[in-house]
Image (cartoon, rainbow, N blue to C red):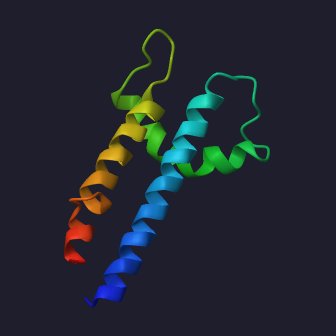
Amino acid sequence: MNANNIQLLNIGVSLILVLMTFLFIFRIVLTWYPQVESQKLPFSLVIAPTEPFLAPSRKIIPPIGGVDITPIVWVAIISLIREVLVGQQGLITMMNH
């Protein structure tokens, strides 16, 4: 892979991971409003891409005190993946040097 392709890969992975982090943060905020209709816009734009991650996670991680913590867990997981791949010492970042 040449340097331009690696740089594009780095930017693309970064953008996807940042977008997913924001979606999960918005999902955390939506848990404070259980009356929100999840099938209506703009809420469905947040729920549709995150639910495939959250549904299986809820089977493993039960709610704590009635609060679904799986979006918080996914923010942590994505932050770790982001650091490992595109952080200062990330794998993709190091391939570019």
Residue at the farthest top position? 65
Residue at 45%, 45% in the rendered image = 53
Please say if 49 is above or below 10: above
Residue at the farthest bottom position? 2
Residue at 58%, 36% in the rendered image = 27
Q: Nearer the viewer, residue 74 or 4?
A: 4
Q: Measuring from the top left, give residue 31's x and y in whole percent.
A: 61, 26
Please say if 60 is above or below 18: above
Q: Nearer the viewer, residue 31 or 75?
A: 75
* Left or right of residue 12, residue 33 in this image: right
User: Which quarter shows the C terminus?
Assistant: bottom left
Q: Measuring from the top left, give residue 68's x and y in whole percent.
A: 49, 23
Q: Measuring from the top left, give residue 78's x and y in whole percent.
A: 37, 47
Residue at 56%, 52% in the rendered image = 49
Please say if 36 is above or below 85: above
Q: Quadrant of residue 91?
A: bottom left
Please say if 90 is above or below 30: below
User: Which quarter shows the N terminus?
Assistant: bottom left
Badge count: 0
Q: Nearer the viewer, residue 85 or 88?
A: 88
Residue at 36%, 71% in the rendered image = 10
Q: Measuring from the top left, give residue 11's x and y in whole percent.
A: 43, 71
* Left or right of residue 55, residue 6 in this image: left
